Image (cartoon, rainbow, N blue to C red):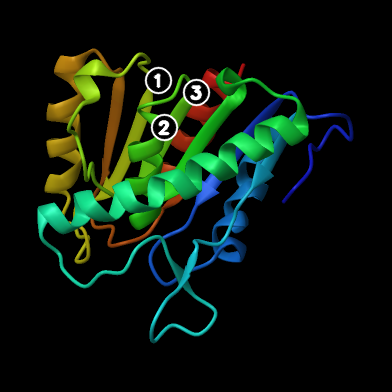
Amino acid sequence: MVPPASGGAPRSMVILLHGYGSNGDDLIGLVPYWRAALPDTVFLSPNAPQPCPGAPGGYQWWALTSFSPDARAAGVRQAAPIVNGFIDRQLAAHGLPEDRLALVGFSQGTMMALQVGLRRPIAGIAGYSGMLADPDGLDASPSRPPVLLVHGDADPMVPVAALQQAQAALAPLGFEVTAHVSRGLGHSIDEAGLRLGGQFLSRVLA
C-alpha cells in the first residue's frame, strides 16, 4: 500500500493486479509515476491468492494448466470472488464508494481487472498486455466503466490481437475503450503506456 501523497484521508483508490508469476511488490513500482497527479489516492497492490509453481515469491490468480479460451474463462470466474472480496473490504476500510475506485492490471492481472471491473460501477480500468477472458454476460452488466487498453505489438506472451479482440467485444456494448499499441514493445509497459495510464487515472478519478 502507498498512502495518499497529500497526507490526508484518501478520496480515491487504485488497486493494481499483477501478472502471472509476479507479486504485489512488482506492480506497486508503477505508483511513483502517477502519485503526484493523484495526491488524494491510496494505491493497493495485493498478491494473487495462489503461489506460482516454479516462481519463488511469485503468485498466480489461477493456474495456467491450459491456454484454451474455456480454461481462461474458467480461471477468471474462479478468481473473481476473491478479487471482489478484496475490493469490498478495502473500500469499506477506507470509506470510499465504488465510483472512486480504478483498477490497473498487467497480463493475467488485466484479465482479472476486466473480469471484475466491467461488472461493477467503478471509475475505470487500465489494462496492460492482457485480454478479455470472459465476455459472457457483459451485455447485461449494469455499469459501463471506461477502459484503457495498452499492448506492445511485439508481445510474445499475449499477442497484440487480444487488444483488438477486446475492443471489438466491448465497444458495441457501449463501453468507452481507449486503445494504444506500442511499436516494438514486448510483454512490458513502456513510457508511453505509463503516461497514458496516468492521464487516464487522473481523468476517471478527477
Whole-angstrom CA distance, mark 2 to mark 1, is 8 Å
- Residue 117: assigned label: 2
Q: What residue type is labelled 2?
A: Gly
What is the count of numbered marks?
A: 3
Question: Dot 3: few (<14), some (14–19), or many (≥20) neighbours within 10 Å?
Answer: many
Secondary structure found at label 3: loop
Whole-angstrom CA distance, mark 3 to mark 1, is 6 Å
Q: Which of marks 3 and 1 is nearer the N terminus?
A: 3
Q: Do the residues labelled 3 and 1 touch (CB within 8 Å)?
A: yes
Residue 32: percent from the left, percent from the top?
Answer: 67, 49
Q: Which of marks 2 and 1 is nearer the N terminus?
A: 2
Q: Which amino acid does label 3 sit on?
A: Ile
Q: Is residue 72 visible?
A: yes
Q: Which amino acid does label 1 sit on?
A: Pro
Label 3: which residue? 122
Q: Do the residues labelled 2 and 1 touch (CB within 8 Å)?
A: yes
Question: Dot 2: few (<14), some (14–19), or many (≥20) neighbours within 10 Å?
Answer: many
Q: Earlier in the sequence, mark 2 or mark 3?
A: 2
